[in-house]
Image: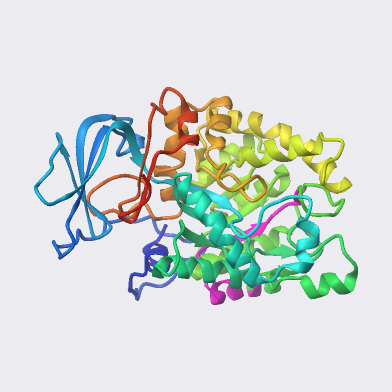
Amino acid sequence: MPMARNIFFAAAIFGALGCTSQPAPTAQAQPAPQQAQTSPIPAPGSAPDTYIHAGRLLADPASGAVLTEQTIIVRAGRIVSITPGYTDPAGADAIDLRNEFVLPGLIDSHVHITSEQGPNSRINTFLKTSADGAIAGVGFGMKTLEAGFTTIADLGANAEAILALRDGIARGDIDGPRIIASAGGISIHGGHGDANGMPRGMALHLRGPGVCSGADDCARAVRERVRDGADVIKITATGGVLSITAAGLGQQFTDEELSAIIEAAHAMGRSVTAHAHGVDGINSFLRAGGDSIEHGTFSDEESARLYKENGAYLVPTLLAGDFVAREAAKEDTFLQPAQQQKALEAGPQMLGMLRRMHAAGVKIAFGTDTGVSAHGDNAQEFALMVEAGMTPLEAITAATNNAAAHFRLDHEIGTIAPGKAADIIAVDGDPLTNVRELESVDFVMKGGKVYVD
């Protein structure tokens, strides 16, 4: 990813100030990514350093190296050093994790933090305001943070709600996970993401500004999302399970519209991720130069080739597939008939899809689509990833190194290293032996502040 995008993400999410005079890249000619640099280590100040004594430490999951009896020094929210042995200077704040397994804060690349699916989801469309969504997001955000997820990407929430929440957390006004926000989504008229399943007058009133038709109009929608403050552009390249319309799961944007969206986004320093189930929409989006796919349910051999050719990430969201399949099988399901049919079609396919894509060498970033399932249950995705053929270490790497690189934030998060944000979690057992240990986190630090101890 070009430096313009690295600077954007660092400024938007961490409050850094920066600018670049380099021209923005286009989808046709993007320079190779530059090596991200860690932020400077703060000089000693009035507040004492924090010393974390880690019995077992997986500082860099991609390396697979587990160190023992290490001391992590944290200063002003950043990691200063990692040294062998247990150091405990007089007067220092010490955190005893000698009996714990310590690893970087987890990253969920796909959530909906301002809402949660349930029997009242449809009526809430009419009853809840953007302010209600922001307030709900505070509670859901804390559940997520306390589950060990120190960074999340919200892909689709109302722009006013999610941007207020993102910025309030970044300023320190409220607590919650670091948020990467799409500030809404982009959809075709009548497609997944439009206001479907209601009378026309209501639909027109509830329709968001990201609905478009035609290449020029879709480029306009991208630019408006950027204007609003989007960190990343999220589109619905195919039909979706939870849209109340019998429009299937196939491609919805035309190839020309996809190209226009990606070109406009890249020109303004944003990456594009696509909700996509049907293989036609997946492959068309990847051919157009898209950066990542959410779900990827019917990905095939050609998809695998295109993922690798583009360097694109797959965010498999197995937990959402598992949830909707189980819900659709209930006699008293809250899903509408069109939703139920699509859930039974797509949900059972997702484990096999990830097994094939992983075997083919596609890059995987952890993501759950939480908000479909319950907030705070995000870590249940790990066991499903292992069931699909990934090792526990590979699944953890997807939620740390890979997810950080996916969002071009690997200079700030994803590993425990000097200069990076002090996002650190710990569990009692060994998640490399039993990945379900991550479903019960004993310690959470984000940016040097302890939330679970």
Considering depth in this image, is 105 or 216 the residue closer to the camera?
105
Residue at the right extreme of this rendering:
199
> Magenta stretch: residue 231 in it?
yes
User: Compared with residue 168, is residue 64 higher up or lower down, i.e. above or below?
Assistant: above
In the rendered image, residue 134, in percent from the top left (x then y), is placed at 59, 67
Q: Residue at x 51, y 65 (%)?
A: 266
Q: Residue at x 86, y 49 (%)?
A: 336
Whether residue 366 is visible, yes or no, is yes
Residue in the foreground of this view, choosing between 273 and 370? 370
Q: Residue at x 24, y 54 (%)?
A: 419
Left or right of 350? Residue 410 is left
Q: At which x and y percent is residue 78?
A: 26, 56
Q: Nearer the viewer, residue 14 or 62?
A: 14
Q: Is residue 222 visible?
A: no
Picture quarter with the C terminus: top left
Horizontal relation, residue 243 to residue 175: left or right = right
For the N terminus, the image quarter is bottom left
From the top left corner, tell me how far across and down residue 161 is, in percent.
59, 69
From which residue to which does the magenta span run? 220-240
Q: Could you tell me which residue is drawn at 38 percent across and 30 percent down?
A: 428
Please, which colouring scheme is shown?
A: rainbow
- Work out which residue is located at the far left of the displayed protein and give it: 90
From the viewer's perspective, is 313 left or right of 136?
left
